[in-house]
Image: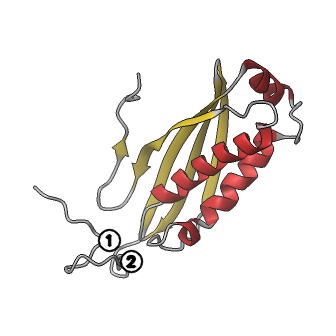
């Protein structure tokens, strides 16, 4: 079975999908990513000693702000009234993992909002800590889970890099 690309009309032109007739349902998306860095940069972030200040606090605020502005960044996304955006960080041996969760009750999903939030959090960590390590690598940005809507519950398979 071939899936139709919903952002293309019958002539192949890009357009915003009409969600007017869709029912409002609870929708949630979880996205994540990782930023690999030097031991010194990781230690400074953990200790709160980065030159620009509170790295993770700033990254959390930037991610929430970005999620709310996703439709301004991604041309065919619908502007959404998000109910919640949560950003979590976890220290690992070689860097910091971010998990972004976006949710609402609405007619379209929040996958892009979660992905934009995760990406922005990682970019902000880079910006806040680049004086310590310009070679940081942002990787593994992906959708982890989505709930709601016609397609229901979807969960990513195990890490493809593992």
Q: What residue sits 67% from the left and 27% below the top?
A: 37
Q: Mark 1 = which residue?
A: 7
Q: What residue sits 42% from the left and 67% below the top?
A: 108
Q: Is residue 103 above or below residue 88?
A: below
In the figure, is residue 75 to the left or right of 72?
left
Q: Is residue 87 above or below residue 42?
A: below
Screen quadrant of the N terminus: bottom left
Q: Farthest front residue?
A: 134
| Residue 112, percent from left and from top | 48, 58
| Residue 33, percent from left and from top | 55, 38
Question: What mark, if any, has residue 67 been given in the picture?
Answer: none
In the figure, is residue 85 to the left or right of 44?
left
Q: Is residue 29 above or below residue 19?
A: above
Q: CA gap, disc 2 to disc 1?
A: 6 Å
Q: Farthest left residue?
A: 1
SS for callout 1: loop
| Residue 79, percent from left and from top | 53, 74
In the figure, is residue 141 to the left or right of 42?
left
* Badge 1 density bin: few <14, some 14–19, many ≥20, Cα 10 Å: some
Residue toward you, 157 or 105? 157
Q: What residue sits 71% from the left and 47% below the top?
A: 124
In the figure, is residue 37 to the left or right of 159?
right
| Residue 119, percent from left and from top | 58, 48
Residue toward you, 71 or 111? 71
Screen quadrant of the C terminus: top left
Q: What residue sits 51% from the left and 45% below the top?
A: 31
The disc, 2 or 1, on the residue closer to the chain's N-terminal end is 1
Q: Mark 2 = which residue?
A: 16
Do the residues under discs 2 and 1 have CB atoms within 8 angstroms? yes
């Amino acid at each position: 079975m071939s899936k139709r690309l919903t952002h293309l009309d019958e002539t192949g032109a890009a357009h915003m999908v009409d969600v007017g007739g869709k029912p409002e349902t609870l929708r949630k998306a979880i996205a994540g990513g990782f930023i690999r860095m030097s031991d010194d940069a990781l230690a400074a972030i953990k200790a709160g000693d980065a030159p620009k200040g509170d790295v993770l606090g700033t990254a959390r605020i930037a991610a929430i702000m970005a999620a709310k502005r996703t439709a301004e960044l991604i041309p065919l996304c619908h502007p959404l009234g998000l109910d919640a955006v949560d950003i979590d960080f976890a220290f690992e041996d070689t860097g910091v993992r971010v998990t972004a969760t976006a949710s609402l009750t609405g007619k379209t999903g929040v996958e892009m909002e979660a992905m934009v939030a995760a990406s922005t959090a990682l970019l902000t960590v880079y910006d806040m800590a680049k004086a310590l390590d310009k070679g940081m690598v942002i990787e593994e940005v992906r959708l982890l889970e989505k709930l709601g809507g016609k397609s229901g519950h979807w969960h990513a398979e195990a890490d493809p890099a593992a």
